[in-house]
Image (cartoon, grey):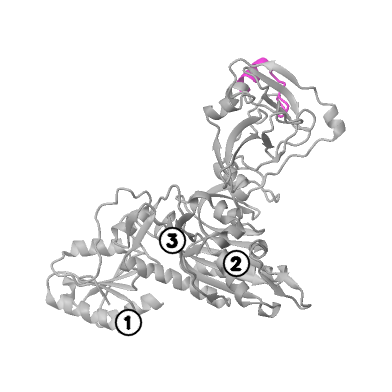
Amino acid sequence: MIRMSSSFLRTLREDPADAEVASHKLLVRAGYIRRSAAGVYTWLPLGLRVLRRVEQIVREEQDAIGAEEVVFSALQPRAPYEATGRWTEYGPTLFRLQDRREDDYLLAPTHEEMFTLAVKDLYTSYKDLPAMLYQVQNKFRDEARPRAGLLRTREFVMKDAYSFDIDDAGLDASYEKQRAAYQRTFERLGLPVVICRADAGAMGGSRSEEFLHPTPVGEDTFVVSDGGYAANVEAVTTRAPASLSAAEIAALPGMHVEDTPGASTIAALTDYSNEAFPGQGPIAESGEWTRYEMLKHLVYLLTHPDGSTEPLVIAIPGDREVDEKRLEAAVAPAVAAPFTAEDFARHPALTKGFIGPEGLGLENSTGIRYLVDPRVVPGSRWVAGAGEADKHVYDLVYGRDFTADGTIEAAAVHDGDPAPDGSGPMRLTRGMEMGHIFQLGRKYAEALDLKVLDENGKATVVTMGSYGIGVTRAVAAIAELGHDDKGLIWPRAVAPADVHVLATGKDAAAFAEAERISAELEAQGLTVLYDDRPKVSPGVKFKDAELLGMPTVVVVGRSLAEGIVEIRDRAEGTIEEVSPQTVVDDVLRAVRG
């Protein structure tokens, strides 16, 4: 029994000043967590109970598919991360430190290397495989902008699992087991999720899917189509228009440079084109010029993990903006920053506001890497900067007048864009990443020389999968989903207590009866939070009960004299009056169904 009179619990009436979202406000106010530093939180007793219940559900579903639990140290040596390249690739996100002997260590952001080395140390034959291991462990990432309480932190609890198989067929089977386990896990947690195609990022590998919980406070944007396509925007591929044949390209009008005074923006260039060359737009049936065919050139400075830099010019249709997350995924592990005035001064061949393929495409005399949007296909016609102020090139044809070093998926995805698989137009929505699963393949096994002998006695590189769930983030997501203007509303599966019993008023008989009910419920195996605080008004106790959010609340107060106690359902907002003699059975039915 958790007695509030002696429990390490204090509730707050005001929202914390730094709180942005409901889950952050309520978890702090209800005394579940306490801020230690930016992106770092202490788990207080009731919060820890919720965290442990979430962890238990995760563990049960991992155990059910045959995964075995281990725990690695959060403090890791540098050498394995050097072998995989991630000591550098992680960049400033990695917490690095040295011991007294000046040996390098890190606080692990994830544990692929350690799992791989453990299997390498112990397994030598295909007969040892498949193997599936997992841990529930603290992870550390130096987020540049920790925010929203537990939703983006610098220290967090994650379940990470890894599968080890002799071949790709085995990896496929392990992946599907984990995929199904994740679906059951989030169903039990009461968190609706959409399984989306995802970018593998720094993890590497081939198949990659995210489990995104739709919510307005999510940091991820994903798309869905009526035909069943779902993907994080970072992983959406553009359906490019058809290319023209050489004969069709030869029939197109030649490019020509025109004076375009003051047209240094896409909007101004579009307006000018419609005024100066009405009815000559190549796309719209009306001949109207649109922003789409104004090829926008943007310049970024890439900083690579080793500290080296390089400029990058990308071209996208003028009706699009660059999606920073898509750009980040496309250039990873490098980091992209827009060119500054100083950068332009160092590269005088790039005329800000009038950049075009001149000097970039075909012979590329600038030596600057030049990438274009996938919609820029052979035969497509564009208007672009002519490389000098107040001039643009019209009827610029890709494949005839200019080429690029490759394509890049960096342009923003719009509502109504066609799904890559042809399943219809896509819709954009916000979501929170709750889990991510990867088919890593042989990247880490090759880097760390994880091999076993196959049936023929030949050394074979093991193939791996990686499967993560954000446990602390799940607590925040459940709180974000389950609350009202009065406080938290925990689902029964993760609530810190099954029943919250309130003794209200000053009558000693009410306290005695509340004590009896609490003891009997506890004897039946329920976890009871008992508000036995003397000299605390009923109003305060009711407000605390609403804030703390237990699914079932029993109120023993002045109605006891009339043979009545109340059972309140926090989620439904209902109140049932029952007899003190039947209340325990009534609560058991409510809790256990």
- Tell me which numbered mark, 2 or 3, is placed earlier along the sequence: 3
* Residue picked out by circle 2: 179
Q: Nearer the viewer, mark 2 or mark 3?
A: 3
Rendered image quadrant of residue 45:
bottom left
Query: Which class describes the residues within 10 Å of circle 2: few (<14), some (14-19), or many (20+)?
Result: some
- Tell me which numbered mark, 3 or 1, is placed earlier along the sequence: 3
Cα distance between the residues tagged 1 and 2:
39 Å
Q: Are marks 2 and 3 in contact (CB under 8 Å)?
A: no
Query: Which class describes the residues within 10 Å of circle 1: few (<14), some (14-19), or many (20+)?
Result: few
* Amino acid type for the residue under numbered disc 1: Asp
* Residue picked out by circle 3: 99
Is 375 located above or below residue 278 in the figure?
below
* Foreground residue among 311 and 325: 311
Part of the protein shown in magenta = 270-286
Residue depicted at 67% across the width and 58% down the height: 206
Q: Is residue 141 left or right of residue 20?
A: right
| Outermost residue, front side | 101
Q: Is residue 70 left or right of residue 47?
A: right
* Amino acid type for the residue under numbered disc 3: Asp
* Amino acid type for the residue under numbered disc 2: Arg
SS at circle 2:
helix
- Tell me which numbered mark, 1 or 2, is placed earlier along the sequence: 2
SS at circle 3:
loop
| Outermost residue, right side | 247
Q: Nearer the viewer, mark 1 or mark 2?
A: 2
**Disc number at residue 585?**
1
Residue depicted at 41% across the width and 59% down the height: 476
* Foreground residue among 387 and 309: 309
On the rendered image, what quadrant is the N terminus found in?
A: bottom left
